[in-house]
Amino acid sequence: MVFSSLNYLFFLPVVFFAYWLTSGSLRKVVLLIASYIFYMSWLPAYGLLLLAMTLFNYFAALFIDRYRGQKILLWLALSFNLLILAYYKYAEFLCRSFFTLISPAQKAFNFTAFHDNHVSTIILPLGISFFAFEFIHYCIDVHRGGRPIKNPLDFALFSSFFPSQISGPIKRYQQFAEQLSERKTLSQEDVSAGCGLIVRGLFKKVALADNLASITSVGMNNWHSLGTLDAWVLMVVFVWQVYFDFSGYTDMGIGSARLLGFQIPNNFDLPYIASKNLIEFWQRWHITLSTWLRDYVQLPMTGFRASRLRFNLATVVTMSACGLWHGAAWHFVAWGFAHGLILVATREYLQMVKASSALRQIHAQSWMVPVACLGTFLLVLIAQTLFLARSVPDAFHLLITMLTPCRSAVDLSVRALESPVVVPLILYAIWGLVFVEISWLPLAALRPIKEFLSANSARKAALYICIFVASIAFAPSFANPFIYFQF
Amino acid sequence: MSQATFAKGHIESTRARVRRTDSKWLLIAQFIVFLIGGLILLEPILSLAGVADEEVLEIDEKTGWTLMPGRTFTYRTEGYSRSTINSLGMRDVERTVAKPANTYRIAVLGCSLTEGKQVDLDKTYCQLLEKRLNKGNSPVKYEVLNFAVSAYSLGQEYLRLKHKALQFKPDLVIFTARPNSLLFMGPTLKTGFLHSPPLFGVLPDGTLFEDHNKQKMWLASADGIRTKNSHWLRRNSRLWGLAGRCVLSIDEFYDATVIHLRKLWSGEFSVEQTAKNDTEKKLSNNRNSKFRPEMVFLGRVAEAVLKAAKNDCQKADCKFVLAYLPASAKYRDPAEREIFESIAQRQKLNFIDFNPEFDRLEKEGNNNFYVVVHFSKAGNDAVEKYLYRQLVLQDLLK
């Protein structure tokens, strides 16, 4: 089930009423059943996988807590989660890479038959990257001294909570368990905020991302006949498509959780508009993944007092792992590696700025903020070629097209301008200027409009309905699945 | 508590209640005003963006339905296009009913495959053919008039020919049949706008019989009257069209949910697989349907339609061609193709069959001719090229 589908439009109100009409443990049972229905609506058998992983990690954490100091238990738990992730997500990638490495031996072994019979039949369970990471975090934190969740119902809910089940945000059990133990009451504030987030997310997904996707697919289908302008248009369209798609999903997830009285962490904080450098970008983009990687990949490698070299190496390794998490292909690893290198360069440059008064003065200028934001956006955009391409050579081909003037054969820019996405983009920009506070833009004059439109719940409700209607109107008939489902 | 204190308290609580009630009504009023204001504002915004205007059909008492003249639309269901139906209700550039001097007119009758909303107007095969024919320095100017309308059956094509196309004095009529044309000629138990077209039968002497009863019944029904009365809104309001689309989606969703729940109840847990199996079963039933009695009957009806169309064309002194359009492999029906071929032989019709050509092209590795079931840009190109070749070969352009 997808948040932007008609199924969900019926599913959510049913869960909402069933949840608030019950109380105590029954409420949790309702939520757990709803979460499993949500997950199993795609491929029922994989509900068993989620259940098996939940049971394993529940008992593993109890044992880790009981026999604290026995690292073997932690390693066992981590290995179990990683092996499952590797089997479902990386089996094909690992096999292909392995057989490419030992290509002479490949002749003796029929790789194609092996691949067709054993590897290509594996279907990636939705959201496995997300809930596997949540389980890993849980086991490590319990090992580090955290208290495990004793109530199996609470733990099952933590692992299957449907608003964050398939594409995150990656939750931390401490905050979630605390909310599970709270006595919840339905508040007008939660309903209003939840509905607001859901319609905002829906608009981002169906009015913006799905319409941008049709432009991206034209570019993808004409990869080798794109002109310079086409290549730039393709990349600009793609980076915004990914943002609207993923942040739209997150908004709908957070909004749905809010309707049920839960607050799950935010994943985006204006990454393309307010990031002055790549370090800041990763503090604003997919926040729960970057903090997870920091806490469970980078920090174990560096500790808190690592040398500069070790820290930089750890950054590159962590970001390469981040790339691999995004997809089982070498171009994703290259994308992560490139981000790692840029992060290291950024850190070194910031050290230089700290040391040089002239550079400090330049950076203190007010015009520097938008310039730095634009520069960061361009860096992200160029690195994103590795993300979009189907292989590293394809990415380099696109980069060369972007950097060397050549005539357009596809007219992607014309297509983009003629597309129905232009008007919703303008609407979204207006909404952003009115409702979002961006530090480097003087937007105080627009504050009265915000106050006028959101003065009370009646006006907000009317506004949400209008956004909802607009979302449906702008939605292309064939909705695209969320991009981050494949991760 | 003294009487005075009680009375004061009572008055205050009453006042507070009144204030609360006031504010409640005020909130409701604000909600309504803001909602209506917002929706009114949305109309021009949607119009500017060119969305939610896919509704292009209106009731036509002669043919069942026709295209709304002058209607600008954006099509996004399969493929993408933005264009305007001309003032004469055709997916075509502006034309005049009177034939200009030194002009050879080709009228193309058909359904959505020929209408070609999946591509921009200048990429439809009719427009491409017109451009190709006018390329040289010939003293004769060619016009390829597109009379196709979505969801038309062969019978409706004939009515469109009789009541509209022949007024344009064409020199050549291309009557297109799509895959499953025969099955679309049959009656359906469903009712509604697109399910109540004129129906056709064959009299014992083999002549065509038009049956407008189902259409009239629907037009007199509440649904028909509502559709007729809401014509202005259907034509001008995008939100109205959007609401209609939502109702249809919910209806389809309801049907699908009921089917899925039944499957689950009967223990078939892999819902997607069973849905896929069902579709495949349906398709395999549709294929090779040569021996089904309804196909034989519908073949006779189709023959009567084509005979009537050919006779009308002969009376109007214009040539007549039957063109059998291709379909993606999934929707092909070899039996139907054979039926059309034999009708063409019996009735001595000029016949253009696109299927062998498309089979050949697909064997060469071209498989981008369709957007779902309709022609893509490449599909329109291929149809136009083959159509031109065949018109030249069969000497139909003079």
Image (cartoon, coloured by chain):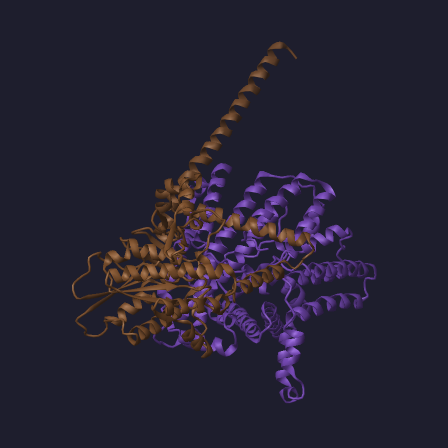
Chain colours: A purple, B brown
Question: Residue B156 lies in what quarter of the image?
Answer: bottom left
Q: Position of residue B142 (x, y in %)?
A: 23, 67
Q: Identify the residue shown where x is 82% and y is 66%.
A: A70
For image coordinates 19% across by 74% down, the residue present is: B137
Number of numbered discs overlaid on the protein picture: 0
Query: Between A276 and A219, which is closer to the camera in this rendering?
Result: A219
The x and y percentages for residue A38 are: 64, 53
Q: Residue at x 48, y 55 (%)?
A: A206
Query: For the view shown, which residue lies furthest in the front direction?
Result: B205
Quadrant the C terminus of chain B occupies? bottom left
Is residue B16 left or right of B240 when viewed as pictured?
right
Q: Is residue A31 left or right of residue A252?
A: right
Q: Is residue A20 above or below residue A63?
A: above
x, y percentage for residue B272? 61, 60
Q: Quadrant of the N terminus of chain B?
A: top right
Q: Using the image as rendered, state which of residue A394 and residue B20 is in the foreground.
A: A394
Image quarter of residue B93: bottom left
Q: Nearer the viewer, residue A58 or B389?
A: B389
Looking at the image, which residue is at 62% across and 81% down?
A112
x and y, in percent, of residue A374 in the image: 43, 63
Can residue B225 be spotted in the picture? yes
**Relative depth, front residue between A190 and B398:** B398
Residue, far right: A67
- Please say whether residue A362 is visible from this viewpoint: no
Q: Quadrant of residue B356?
A: bottom left
Side of A175 where B213 appears, left or right: left
